[in-house]
Image: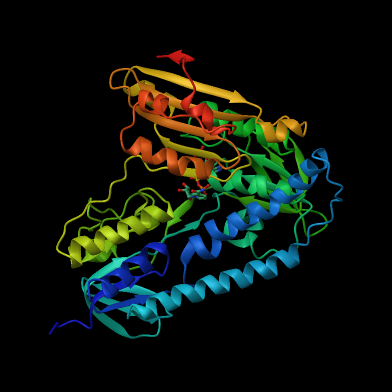
Amino acid sequence: MSDFDYDLFVIGGGSGGVRAARVAAGEAGAKVALAEEDRYGGTCVIRGCVPKKLMVFASEYAGVVEEAAAYGWDLTQGAFNWRAFQTRLNAELDRLEEIYRKLLKGSGVETYDARATVSGPHEVTLSTGETKTAKHILVATGGRPVRPDIPNAELGIVSDDIFHLDQLPKSLLIVGGGYIACEFAGIMNGLGVEVTQFYRGAQVLRGFDTEARDLVADSMRERGIDLQVDTNIAQMDRAADGAAVHVTSTTGDARDYDVVLFATGRDPNTDGMGLEPLGVVLGRRGQIEVDAYSQTAVPSIYAIGDVTDRVNLTPVAIREGMAFVETVFKGNPTQVDHDLIPSAIFTQPEMGTVGLSEEDARAQEPIEVYSTSFRPMQTSFAGRPDKVLMKLVVSQKTRKVLGCHIVAPGAGEMIQLAGIAVKMGATKEDFDRTVAVHPTMSEEMVTMRTPVRTA
Ligand code: NDP
């Protein structure tokens, strides 16, 4: 009989925390509790991936109607009804949250709808005032969007707020050049909002393959987004009408925007969690420092997901949660493999990527680059200028594909499968031996014969 109330207390009911709790209770037979102060499902389900992707779908219909006309359909474009969409979206999120609650209950996890902080190596304190003890504590509190430290920043909104807007703005300024900024620029533009985007650097999506970033940026502009690079907010104030925001840019432009959205990064949720006094080490941005087994400097306390700021993606948090359970509750020490993680950015068109960018690969070893950019059949027939990119970065020495980059409609779906080959260590010749699927965009991945560059 344990001296603790629980074998495991999980703080945070997002993707990582829920999975770890469920598996520890359901498969490893542990006595588990989980506390969540907000809604079950966390960032991904409630205010991230899921509602965002549904908004991407919503925003793409305008283009479909336009394209259909070129294919002979007699369709008229109606108006987008934000309220109708929002009602369905909220119902869907309620449904998903309920599923998360049921999954926890079905696995025998006790839940507390309360904020929990860590008050000892084996103790948590709930906002209800109760304390609970546990042999292990798992912190899975995720992250939150941050505004830049500039005067009047509170006049802007963050990504959490988008889903709750009463109405769509006529004009929107998005600040930032990362995933969230670029995805929402595409969504809002597709929904008919006049979108301006300021990015402080030379090109959006820093860290990704340059050729892919360039094509995404070109396509964003082509579709009507006013993307301004090397630009930031110099000053922002409430506009004379009392509702809009008056913004002066660092390039000297000044105008009113109905809404300003800051997509300027996310910080880990560790404020006031009680971790540092116990000896848990936090990094510069407040992220919890963990080892390869997700263990903190306090042996009974572990952390997974965005709060550790390793690779901030839902499937990674889930993997980290599963590895934690294997290690701690199944006697099978398991490190999470953070190498060659495929991912997609749901810009329009999407970018799918796995492995090294051309720039990073070149810095590592001699490479060959196979790359082709072309107008795909479907949109080209409709007279649209859209281009796609298929690209492989190959090691000259081992012939392995070090990086695969796709910019195209459906790139997220394509990269999931290409990711298997790359993860298996496929060589360029393995790709070449695979017969093309015709006519598709991705057949180019197995038909590129001559490198466009070596470096
Ligand atoms: P990112 O860190 O990706 O991007 C933040 C952006 O804001 C960067 O362009 C950064 O510029 C800019 N920025 C930061 N501070 C300032 C400032 N003070 N003034 C002006 N610009 C600033 O964060 P996101 O919020 O877009 O996304 C957070 C994380 O969420 C991502 O890293 C990703 O892991 C995850 N995510 C994943 C998605 C997916 O898989 N599809 C979708 C959405 C989010 P600079 O480049 O110069 O630093």
Q: How many marks?
A: 0
301 to the left or right of 340: left
Q: Position of residue 427 (x, y in %)?
A: 34, 27
Can you give x and y, in whole percent of width and height, for residue 302 in the image? 25, 62
Identify whether 422 is placed above or below 132.
Answer: above
> Based on the displayed image, in which of its 4 quarters is residue 220 positioned?
top right
Q: Quadrant of residue 356?
A: top left
**Position of residue 300 measured from the top left corner of the image (x, y, whole percent):** 19, 67
Q: Is residue 230 visible?
A: no
> Viewer-proximal residue, 35 or 348?
348
Residue 447 relative to residue 78: left or right: left
For the C terminus, give its image quadrant.
Answer: top left
Q: Residue at x 44, y 26 (%)?
A: 392
Q: On the rendered image, what quadrant is the N terminus found in?
A: bottom left
Q: Nearer the viewer, residue 435 or 163?
A: 435
Residue 443 makes an appearance in the image: yes
Picture layout, residue 102 above or below residue 311 = below
Q: Which residue is drawn at the image coordinates 32% and 41% (left, top)?
A: 339
Image coords of residue 411 (percent x, y): 54, 40
Q: Residue at x 51, y 22 (%)?
A: 371
Residue found at the very far left of the displayed protein? 1
Q: Nearer the viewer, residue 287 or 22?
A: 22
Write the residue at 14% across / 83% down.
Answer: 3
